[in-house]
């Protein structure tokens, strides 16, 4: 797999070709080749905003720097990696590890992103072999802080000295972030990155590479693949990144008298991998702002063929163009995908008139601060969840006063579904431990409302894609599912548990969405397992 | 430097990169010039004088030296497959599903490894059973023995395999037989529960036969015996398919005769080449989730074969180790682009390749692996001979015959060992508590330099005054010991305690090793007494030794003898202390009056102030 190719067809092809010509006329590829960021507005003049273009080369130095750390970790038998990171940072590392092609198929990586408290239990069983990576661009997230406290306490209880504990943590953060100072005080090893590098463009930076290398991924071939792609990105003709960007940005522009195709279905052979998750956050954060944005979707959330004219599909590495019904097919080695999509996002952002390098920091900070306030006010007591509108069979339903017309769960869900705009979408957010996710509800709900359904779990989903949902077209309706936590962990030195934190995050997200006038229905499952079963039944209940 | 070189044969794959690869490449020429593969394949006695298996090559030999297990030889065990099969059938028919193995050294470790690997399905790695049906009694600690002899269920379904002859195995034999008799088994029924590994015609075999025990032709105390009856018999009785194992092992043999692309030769060149280049400590990355737990066996194999020319450090996760110029790393099922060297492959094939490699390394380091006397006998006497490192190699042939070994074993319990052990007598009763502190001055226990802790759980510190001047606390003891270590040295924690992870002090001692490693930034090895192998020719001059002994809660009296098990154990420990001191090694012995609180205090001291 060495060739790069983007094939597109049908209406999408016409749109894309027009957009590409326009891009070339305006000098966008030339500006990118010259690494000139001025096209994206005055605020983006800082040249390091385009630093991601150099990452395939500049990260080579990182590999050499990491040799000592890798050797020490391998000598010390730390072969189980815990990655604490929400949103972009965690997704980048997971995508690189996946892309590494299973060089170490049994490689043990556990991601702690606040979604599943059960994941922590597996970590606590392997403390002897565990190395923890705290990865956060902006600084200490509430989850990062909580997990660090829980793990430090667990190491201490296991009998490790403070010196040993410090040796078990590696921190990746920006120069000058609050986390870097804190980590230095604790004696943790710190990897610092360029604060001006946009976080959602950082797959090939330390955020993606350091955890992947420590997890045993051979990243050198991935960087080589990316470097090979970067030469083709400097061209004007036959530039796969430019065409992909033209497809994305061209479709998302309102055509005269037509329908905006601003929802994109990403198809990967064998189902969505971590790469899909990473591309989703890149597009959602890169384009989702100023009332615009591209919504990345998973095939599971589609209502069926041809019912949504505002959708277009992109298949990643399909076996043949004929094997997929996607409008666009993209072939590139996995290492090149990262750079290709970053380039395409930059191009699409320019076409859509948004600054793709602007981070989602404000949106993230807003809900984090909200959650912190909720937790502070609650103290040791229960969270201010408010009164449920009604309770139906162990499921508490929280909705706006006008949001239901019958005191039944099915009625509440039905009312929410009716509020999905004609060009909008439904989004299912789950804040639960265990296996249940929106994936179980999405297909049947999508068929029912004939609109696409996006889904994600934990605070991580909105961390990664919140920019689109909150500052994008705001044409979504949200089904938020929370639940009582069965296996909870206290956070040492804090008055809350991980489960309580998760619920506080959900409450803060619900508030942030409602504040923007987005319809939200929150369901709280008193018994998560039984409740999940009922939800699936209700979703399937065709009317 | 991310590139690596790989050698593969029959699913066995060895990789190396960086300085380790260079060190190996430097000695491959030597191995080729000296025709080591051919000589190993033909069992050439000129490789090691004491390794002769053919009587005609040793004109002075009184009888065939068939007691030597040549490395990487699954052949001899194959001849016994029918006999082993019959044993297994008999055990199964009688409902004897659990095996208690009395033995030590690489063969016992191999048996343990095989039994544990039998727990997992080789194809899917899915667990087949939750508990290994093999219990190894390799030390003299009463606790593991009492777990067997007081377990009603286990007594009903256990078969005891006894390998090696010494006061220790004899004592365990007597105690287990007594426990069975106490359950009301007749003399004949008891006799059926024991299987002896002994050479035909040896006094041990004769005695076992007289008592009605089954005797299988085999010999214990071998460095290269992973595929010998002493490990295969207990493994087979514990449910391992040894025929299949031998098939896998045999399949790799042709590749070991090659001069090129020979995985055993390459692995041996890595081991020997690195040691010759000054990297004489090998970190064995044995990640429990991946490999079958090969580390402990490889460690005993390597230190036995090279006489300490290589110091193995088994890394099972979490022992803080920093790379250094005198260390190198071999990861089992590791990451070829990250680890300095990796070995992967099916278990049966790895047993063969590692033995072959250990032999090659021994050759490169001019160590005679067959001269290693694995202690099957008790401490003090062996220690005395071991104080002269040349003693073993001097006994090239005649003195090293099985007859002589047997004589050793025969006299041992009666003389030296028992003499030391008797000192530990404190009074009658089956479960008395041996209190070292109560012993009269002038006993081998000696008076402690000082004691720490409250009266009920005192820790006695026994050390040379010169080593720990003006030190009065545990932290000072640890720092003093670490301070006596040379820059390229290491610490050995030698515990004469219960090695069981949960029920004994296994976890505590392991944790102590990690804390010490973090404290001194040097490798820390853990040995469970009695020390194996008995002080090798070299390799210990860089070590400092922390010896842990402890009072026992419940002792086990040896029927018909005047000593108890804890007496034997303490005698071993004191013998090791004396042997190490005589060779000028810094050694501290801590005697824990209460093992649990004692370990906790030690951990606290090791944790603090670092």
Image (cartoon, helix red, strand yellow):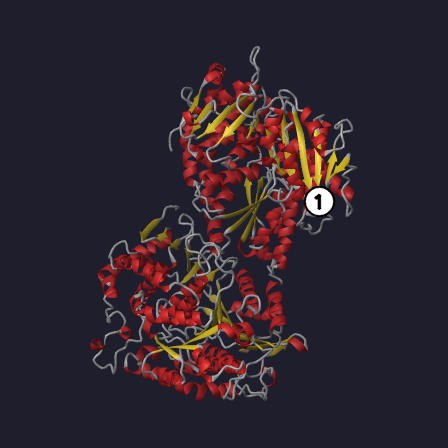
Determine whether, in the image, residue A215 is placed left or right of residue A423: left
Task: Say which of B40 and B210 sits in front.
Answer: B210
Question: Residue extending furthest top?
Answer: A257
In the rendered view, does A334 fall on the left or right side of A45? Answer: left
Residue B395: give x, y in percent of width and height: 31, 80
Query: Which residue is at a point 23% across and 74% down the rendered structure image?
Result: B54
Out of B556 and B177, give the one closest to the viewer. B177
For disc 1, the neighbor class at 10 Å (few under 14, some 14 to 19, many from 20) is many
Secondary structure beneath disc 1?
helix
Viewer can see residue B119: yes
- The chain under label 1 reads A
Q: Residue at x 67, y 77 (%)?
A: B456
Question: How far across and how far down the image is residue B410, in percent?
Answer: 40, 86
Depicted A437 relative to depicted B226: above or below: above
Q: Residue at x 43, y 37 (%)?
A: A222
Count of numbered tags: 1
Give percent across and percent down for residue B295.
Answer: 44, 62
Does B283 sit above or below residue A346?
Answer: below
* Quadrant for the C terminus of chain B in the image: bottom right
Name the residue that disc number 1 marks.
A500
x%, y% of residue B375? 41, 77
Q: Is residue A55 left or right of residue B51?
A: right
At horizontal 63% and vertical 36% (from top left) the residue drawn is A536
Q: Is residue A20 visible?
A: no
Q: Is residue B118 left or right of residue A452?
A: left
Q: Pick whichever, A478 or A213, lies toward us.
A: A478
Write down the quadrant of residue A543 in the picture.
Answer: top right
Q: Is residue B204 above or below residue A407?
A: below
């Amino acid at each position: 797999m060495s060739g790069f190719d983007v094939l597109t067809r049908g209406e999408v092809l016409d749109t894309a070709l027009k957009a590409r010509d326009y891009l070339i006329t305006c000098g966008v590829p030339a500006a990118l080749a010259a690494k000139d960021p001025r096209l994206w507005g005055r605020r983006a003049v800082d040249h390091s905003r385009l630093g991601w273009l150099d990452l395939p080369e500049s990260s080579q130095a990182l590999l050499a720097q990491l040799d000592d750390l890798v050797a020490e970790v391998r000598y010390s038998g730390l072969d189980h990696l815990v990655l604490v990171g929400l949103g972009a940072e965690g997704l980048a590392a997971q995508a690189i590890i996946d892309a590494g092609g299973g060089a170490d198929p049994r490689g043990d990586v556990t991601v702690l992103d606040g979604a599943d408290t059960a994941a922590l239990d597996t970590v606590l069983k392997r403390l002897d072999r565990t190395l923890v990576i705290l990865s956060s661009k902006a600084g200490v997230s509430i989850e990062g802080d909580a997990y660090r406290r829980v793990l430090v306490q667990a190491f201490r209880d296991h009998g490790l000295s403070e010196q040993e504990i410090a040796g078990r943590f590696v921190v990746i953060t920006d120069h000058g972030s609050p986390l870097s100072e804190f980590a230095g005080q604790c004696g943790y090893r710190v990897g610092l990155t360029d604060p001006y590098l946009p976080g959602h463009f950082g797959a090939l930076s330390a955020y993606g590479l350091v955890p992947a290398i420590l997890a045993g991924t051979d990243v050198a071939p991935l960087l080589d693949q990316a470097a090979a792609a970067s030469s083709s990105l400097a061209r004007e003709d036959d530039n796969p990144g430019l065409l992909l960007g033209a497809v994305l940005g061209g479709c998302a522009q309102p055509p005269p008298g037509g329908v905006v195709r601003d929802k994109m279905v990403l198809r990967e052979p064998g189902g969505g991998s971590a790469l899909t998750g990473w591309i989703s956050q890149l597009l959602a954060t890169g384009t989702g702002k100023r009332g615009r944005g591209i919504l990345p979707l998973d095939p599971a959330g589609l209502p069926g063929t041809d019912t949504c004219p505002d959708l277009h599909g992109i298949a990643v590495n399909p076996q043949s163009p004929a094997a997929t019904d996607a409008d666009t097919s993209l072939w590139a080695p996995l290492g090149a995908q990262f750079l290709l999509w970053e380039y395409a996002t930059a191009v699409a952002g320019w076409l859509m008139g948004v600054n793709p390098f602007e981070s989602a920091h404000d949106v993230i900070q807003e809900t984090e601060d909200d959650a912190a306030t909720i937790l502070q006010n609650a103290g040791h007591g229960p969270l201010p969840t408010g009164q449920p509108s009604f309770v139906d069979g162990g499921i508490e339903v929280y909705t706006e006063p006008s949001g239901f017309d019958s005191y039944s769960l099915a009625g509440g869900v039905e009312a929410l579904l009716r509020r999905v705009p004609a060009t909008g979408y439904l989004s299912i957010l789950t804040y639960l431990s265990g296996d249940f996710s929106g994936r179980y509800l999405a297909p049947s709900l999508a068929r029912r409302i004939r609109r696409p359904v996006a889904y994600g779990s934990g605070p991580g989903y909105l961390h990664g894609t919140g920019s689109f949902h909150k500052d994008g077209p705001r044409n979504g309706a949200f089904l938020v599912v929370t639940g009582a936590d069965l296996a909870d962990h206290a956070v040492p030195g804090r008055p809350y548990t991980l489960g309580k934190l998760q619920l506080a995050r959900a409450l803060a997200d619900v508030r942030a969405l409602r504040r923007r006038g987005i319809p939200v229905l929150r369901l709280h499952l008193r018994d998560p397992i039984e409740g999940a079963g009922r939800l699936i039944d209700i979703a399937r209940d065709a009317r | 430097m991310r590139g690596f070189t790989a050698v593969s044969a029959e699913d066995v794959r060895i990789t190396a990169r960086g300085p380790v690869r260079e060190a190996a490449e430097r000695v491959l020429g030597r191995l080729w010039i000296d025709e080591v593969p051919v000589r190993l394949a033909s069992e050439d006695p000129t490789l090691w004088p004491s390794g002769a298996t053919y009587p005609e090559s040793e004109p002075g030999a009184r009888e065939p030296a068939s007691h030597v297990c040549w490395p990487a030889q699954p052949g001899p065990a194959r001849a016994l497959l029918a006999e082993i099969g019959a044993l297994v059938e008999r055990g199964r028919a009688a409902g004897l599903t659990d095996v208690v193995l009395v033995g030590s050294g690489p063969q016992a470790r191999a048996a343990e490894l095989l039994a544990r690997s039998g727990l997992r399905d080789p194809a899917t790695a899915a667990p087949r059973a939750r508990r290994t049906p093999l219990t190894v009694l390799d030390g003299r600690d009463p606790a593991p023995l009492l777990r067997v002899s007081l377990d009603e269920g286990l007594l009903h379904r256990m078969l005891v395999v006894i390998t090696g002859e010494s006061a220790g195995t004899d004592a365990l034999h007597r105690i287990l037989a007594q426990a069975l008799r106490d359950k009301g088994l007749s003399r004949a029924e008891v006799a059926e529960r024991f299987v002896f590994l002994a050479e035909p015609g040896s006094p041990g075999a004769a005695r076992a036969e007289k008592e009605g025990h089954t005797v299988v032709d085999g010999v214990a105390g071998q460095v290269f015996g992973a595929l010998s009856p002493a490990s295969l018999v207990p493994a087979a009785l514990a449910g391992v398919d040894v025929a299949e194992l031998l098939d896998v092992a045999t399949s790799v043999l042709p590749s070991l005769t090659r001069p090129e692309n020979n995985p055993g030769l390459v692995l041996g060149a890595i081991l020997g080449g690195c040691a010759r280049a000054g990297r004489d400590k090998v970190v064995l990355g044995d990640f429990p989730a991946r490999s079958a737990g090969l580390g402990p066996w490889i460690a005993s194999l390597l230190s036995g074969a090279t006489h300490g020319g290589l110091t193995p450090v088994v890394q099972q996760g979490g022992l803080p180790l920093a790379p250094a110029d005198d260390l190198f790393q071999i990861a089992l099922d590791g990451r070829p682009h990250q680890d300095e060297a990796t070995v992967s492959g099916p278990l049966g094939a790895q047993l063969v390749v590692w033995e072959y490699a250990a032999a090659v390394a021994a050759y490169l380091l001019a160590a005679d692996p067959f001269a290693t006397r694995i202690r099957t006998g008790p401490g003090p006497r062996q220690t005395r001979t071991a104080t002269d490192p040349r003693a073993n190699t001097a006994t090239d042939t005649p003195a090293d015959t099985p007859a002589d070994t047997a004589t050793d074993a025969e006299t041992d319990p009666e003389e030296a060992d028992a003499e030391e052990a008797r000192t530990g007598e404190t009074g009658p009763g089956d479960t008395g508590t041996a209190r070292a502190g109560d012993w009269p001055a002038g006993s081998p226990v000696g008076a402690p330099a000082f004691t720490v802790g409250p009266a009920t759980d005192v820790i006695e510190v026994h050390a040379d005054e010169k080593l720990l001047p003006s030190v009065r606390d545990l932290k000072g003891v640890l720092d003093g010991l670490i301070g006596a270590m040379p820059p390229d040295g290491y610490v050995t924690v030698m515990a004469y305690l219960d090695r069981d992870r949960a029920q004994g002090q296994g976890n505590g001692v392991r944790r102590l090793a990690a804390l010490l490693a973090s404290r001194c930034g040097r490798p820390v090895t853990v040995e469970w007494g009695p020390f194996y192998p008995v002080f090798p020719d070299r390799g210990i001059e860089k070590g400092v030794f922390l010896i842990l002994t402890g009072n026992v809660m419940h002792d086990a009296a040896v029927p018909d003898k005047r000593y108890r098990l804890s007496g034997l154990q303490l005698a071993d420990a004191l013998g090791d202390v004396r042997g190490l001191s005589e060779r000028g090694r810094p050694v501290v012995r801590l005697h824990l009056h209460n093992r649990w609180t004692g370990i906790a205090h030690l951990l606290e001291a090791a944790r603090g102030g670092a």
